[in-house]
Amino acid sequence: MSNIKEIERRKTFAIISHPDAGKTTLTEKLLLFSGAIQIAGAVKSNKIRKTATSDFLEIEKQRGISVASSVLSFDYKGQKINLLDTPGHKDFAEDTYRTLTAVDSVILVIDCVKGVEEQTEKLMNVCRMRKTPVIILINKLDREGRDPFELLDEIEEKLSIKVRPLTFPFGMGISFRGVYNLIENTFSFYKANKQFIEDDIRSFKGVDDPALSAIFGSDAKKLKDDIELINGVYEPFNKKDYLDGEVAPVFFGSALNNFGIRELLDTFVQLAPRPVPRETTKGFIDPTDDKFSGFVFKIHANIDPKHRDRMAFVRICSGKFERNTYYHHVRLNRDMKFPNPASFLAQSKSLVETAYPGDVIGLYDSDTFKIGDTLTEGESFMFKGIPRFSPEIFRVVMNKDPFKSKQLEKGLRQLTDEGLAQLFIQPDTNRKVIGVVGELQFDVIKYRLLQEFGATAEFSFMNAYKAFWLKYKSEDDVDEMKRLRSNSLYVDKTNELVFIAESSFALSRAQEKNPKVEFLSQVEHNDQTVEQGY
Ligand code: G4P
């Protein structure tokens, strides 16, 4: 099958980091190294500026930009690289978690001054859950950062993953001289150049090569000691351990100065996995499977504000996608064809005729897709593993314009289908609660409800700790909850019963009183084990 060739040459990945570590800069530099752009500075920052807490126009503008850069595809050394963008702002972290379900590996960027930060830990937890292979870049070596060995220890400890440095820095900040490549025994001399690539690489026969002393003088001993220490402390690099998500190769560099990035990219194309099998409700689907299948992991609204278009991003998992061919929308049990599917090359969007496993295509959508939806050639299975987490902030929705309640309902439904927030409804009172990860999402929801649906909503404070999906075998198991705790009981969009606990104490009490119920703060879209309703 010719598909195999196409599958073999694809690498689909995401760059993740705590905001400000250098994700956007690295994205741009990868495009620069691959030749997809010629000069740095061409990629606009697609992140919502950290200072913008309520600048709606800015949000809109940024959202517009990030559609175009949601997927960046480029060729490098005969491989087709699909880089899936993730939002830079932590308030949209859930979007990032979902995007991680559509990639086969990640590059994690860490700031050498700050080390492992809060968001780095959360993102790594998701990768670990999925056993996603990780390559780490320790960035900003042009700054006075922390001791590299200390950073490596911190990564192992806080991110619970073993590391294996493949390059190692010599100096840092103003004394930064470059990085030693431990696999190839080369030294890459640091040259600060923000716009262009300037390579100055020397090969050595090893750390005992006299040429090393000739170049570095008395400093050569420090470099030699460091390299010997690494080779002594860390086990030799093993590709299988990386592919199993157990060991992360580590690179050092300065994305801003195009430095250390070539080593990273070259190793990435050699090591990173091609599209891997994915779990569905009927078992694993292999990318080499003849029949087409894919799932929606992201929905983007307002591609064109004049037409209220949305775009559903589909990760292709098996077979071959062809334009204008009927595919089966499993949840709706309906066959649909797509005349204008979009693919993404560097920064431009174009019509796609065919696409292969690992590729991401954009389907124009008018309210037919939800996150997690599956397309097949007729079979009725759904892709699993797309996580839903308990929100962190909850607010009660208040309709400020009674004549627009239908619009409000529709707006809430569509925005939550996109995954912008989660909606919980109290069955008896019809009280609606919106749950999000960050405050900024409320601003976006309010703004979009008004702009796109003409609905005016306010959100009032709600004392809540976390939401728990309830898993149980029989209705009797939740009898106590329904009698005594109905104030805290809601259903989500799929009619699953959810307990919104006011505090961790309230959770413990409810757990004590309902021993046959499982309280889950994380479930999956399309998880058929949670299927009870209210
Ligand atoms: P993010 O997407 O992870 O949030 O980070 P981003 O790339 O936007 O980088 C955050 C800041 O760190 C930017 O500075 C960027 O220029 C800087 N940066 C990235 N890589 C390096 C590096 O290797 N060395 C140094 N010294 N700085 C680096 P900014 O001032 O916030 O933005 P800008 O005005 O430069 O765009």
Image (spheres, helix red, strand yellow):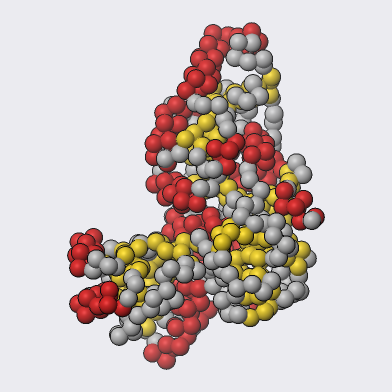
- Residue sitting at the far right: 2
Q: Is residue 503 above or below residue 326?
A: above
Q: Is residue 36 visible?
A: no
> Which quarter of the image is occupied by the C terminus?
bottom left
Question: Is residue 387 left or right of 266 when viewed as pictured?
Answer: left
Choose between 7 and 195: the one closer to the eye.
7
Q: Is residue 107 above or below residue 197?
A: below
> Which quarter of the image is occupied by the N terminus?
bottom right
Residue 281, image quadrant: bottom right
Q: Residue at x 62, y 75 (%)?
A: 329
Q: Residue at x 69, y 35 (%)?
A: 197
Q: How many marks?
A: 0
Residue 214, image quadrant: top right
Question: Is residue 184 left or right of 469 when viewed as pictured?
Answer: right
Coordinates of residue 262 in the picture (x, y in percent): 66, 35
Q: Residue at x 42, y 81 (%)?
A: 456
Q: Residue at x 70, y 56 (%)?
A: 288
Question: Is residue 434 left or right of 131 when viewed as pictured?
Answer: left
Q: Is residue 160 above or below residue 366?
A: above
Coordinates of residue 443 in the picture (x, y in percent): 42, 68
Coordinates of residue 230 in the picture (x, y in percent): 50, 22
Question: Is residue 37 left or right of 315 when viewed as pictured?
Answer: right
Residue 319, image quadrant: bottom right
Choose between 10 and 260: the one closer to the eye.
10
Q: Is residue 392 visible?
A: yes
Coordinates of residue 467 in the picture (x, y in percent): 33, 66
